[in-house]
Amino acid sequence: KPRKGRGGGGGAAAVGKQEAKKKEAKNKAAKKTVRYRRMDANLFTLDLGTLAEDTILATGDPVHCANEECGAVLNSASQLTTPGKEGDGKGEEAEDAVAAEEQGEGDVVDEQLWKCEFCGIDNWVVVSPEEVPRSSSCDFMLQPATVQDESSSGGGSGSASPNVVFCVDLSGSMCVSQALKGDKVKLRGDKALEALRQELNPHGEEQHLDESWNQTWVSRLQCVQAAIDAQLDMLQKEDPNARVGLVTFANDVHLIGDGKQQEVVIAGDRLENEVEVEQVAANFSVATPVAEAAEAIRTRVWDFQEGGQTALGPALLASIVVAGSSPGSKIILCTDGLSNLGFGRLDTEEDLARADVFYASAAEKARAKGITVSVNAIKGSHCSMAHIGLLAKETHGTLDIVDPETVTESFGTIFKNPVIATNLQLRLVMQKGMFLRYEGNNSNAHSLNKTIGNATTDTNVSFEYGVKPVPAGTEIPSVVRFQVQVTFQRLSGAKLCRVVTVEHKVTDNIETVEEDSQLDMSVINRVHTHRGAKLVSEGRYEESRLHTHANRLFLKRAAKRNASHREGYQKWKAQQAEIEEVVKTEMADDEDAAKNLFEGFTYVSEDVQQSRNRRHQKSDTSNNTIYNAMLL
């Protein structure tokens, strides 16, 4: 109401407030209500580092369910029955088979019925008692280890020693220098320089004009040279049979190898032709163990001279071909600039579209050859981690943006996480009525085939699953079953299939799960961190924030219900803080996303082109954070 003595002005103010309220109501109506799935603990992670450990070796070949959509393997929980007999296939009929064998009739085995515990169909199988797995985890030998000639590298049994290829940027920007305190970087010639200092100043008096004494000016290239030198020392001691090769790139690509063969140069129009680069590299090999070639390699390393452009794409592809002669090999890419010459360059919008295809293809080729690609980008430069970081992610290598002075330490970390298996193919089978989330076209199926490629001691893969709606009154099972079949090849050449079958109890009460002290918060943290980081990597910032919000509520409730979960909740918050900072930074820089940053969780429909643009626009620092979160 208008105040006394204010005349009609108060009425105008009242009208203004009414209009403001109408506008606010209209804005609220315009906003869509956001619905998001309540988080749960229906997830798991597979630790593929355990493939390095031996388990029980099963007899015979794996017996698969005839249902192609299932494909489960006969396991220790399977029930076998013989027509006309009672039992589970492990009792009376098994004794009859043993008796027949003792009478010389061991090759006569009755056909038995196996009702698949995953899909429910009947399978008639012929399997002897000793071929029925007796453990929930076992290995089936598909191909024995290879045997080399005595004259071949390494000698004896097993495959050839792995290759280590240093793919080094020698473009002009690698000459950028900085002052380092003390002697953090060991440069060749330091001893001679110190001897000269002693001769000129035998008493060691301080002879400096300003505070810059005890500093060394070093270039980015010198730091990389010192790092390679240090790794040669390490390999000579710890893996003398490893074969080390050098590939450098600037205006052209130089295949130097171990310094004992004729150098090959790829230049000119060849830099635009992937097929020609692969053909040239296929005729080039690294054959000499590092124990014999180290000094020749060092000489070539310290002869590096920077200058020119950055033909990163051709050098990377050539490195993959050279390293691919032996599974378990490594490529260490060190660069400080954007690829701007040859295929894989990133100069224009048209280049970016082609580069998306090239780097994805290169990652697939490296993975198929059992190679890990580790990327070291020099801090203070722009290298498009969105593209080259993809190779580290897909091949289970490492990814880092490093100060020049810490390149040596970063290289050392790469060698602490060796490849233990290659050519990994994973099949996951769940009970009928269950499904996998976020697995593309397989999301509605209860089984999944997935290519993993390489596995290191730290490799793990995660999945989230759900249960399809069931009619009212349907009895909920007390347990659910999962089976993982991992086909892989060890570096010895042996090819195996590991089958693991497990059961888990079921509840329809989320509070029971949240209160359970057996709830593994580290697994939940890893799975949801992977999912959130993947959404950010694809430029789906709004979905990532919704995912984070829902996960926060779940973990907060769990921590409130059970004090033992509080530490896990705090660790998740610390991990998520880095990802959320990336999201806020990138959304603030994105015109469309900025409108939603401070308006809660406003829904934005997925736009493929928008997602692609966001992937390209993210900074190297942001991409580094996100890719490393996905590699946890």
Image (spheres, rainbow, N blue to C red):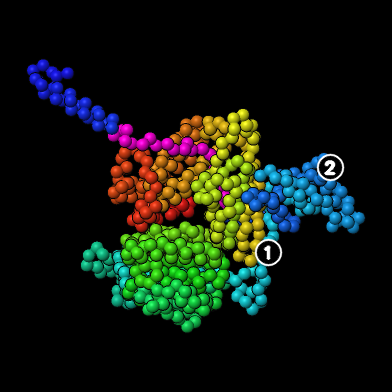
Where residue 445 appears, as percent x and y from the top left, is 57, 47
Where residue 365 appears, as percent x and y from the top left, is 51, 66
Q: Is residue 38 magenta?
A: yes
Q: Which kind of residue does numbered mark 1 sit on?
A: Gln
Q: Could you tell me which secondary element the residue under label 1 belongs to?
A: strand
Between discs 2 and 1, the one toward the N terminus: 2
Q: Which kind of residue does numbered mark 2 sit on?
A: Lys
Residue 32: which quarter of the image?
Answer: top left
The foreground one among 141 and 119 is 119
Where residue 184 appears, as percent x and y from the top left, is 37, 64
Question: Which residue is under mark 1?
Answer: 143
The foreground one among 5 and 282 is 5
Tell me what residue is drawn at x 63 percent, y 43 percent: 431
Count residues near mark 2 (Cα–Cα under 10 Å), then give few for <14, some for 14-19, many for 20+.
Answer: few
Residue 202: which quarter of the image?
Answer: bottom left
On the question of residue 566 being in view, the answer is: no
Question: Which residue is under mark 2?
Answer: 85
| Magenta segment | 27-48
Observer-side mark, 2 or 1, equals 2
Q: Is residue 624 magenta?
A: no
On the question of residue 286 being in view, the answer is: yes
The foreground one among 195 and 561 is 561
Question: Which image quarter holds the N terminus?
Answer: top left
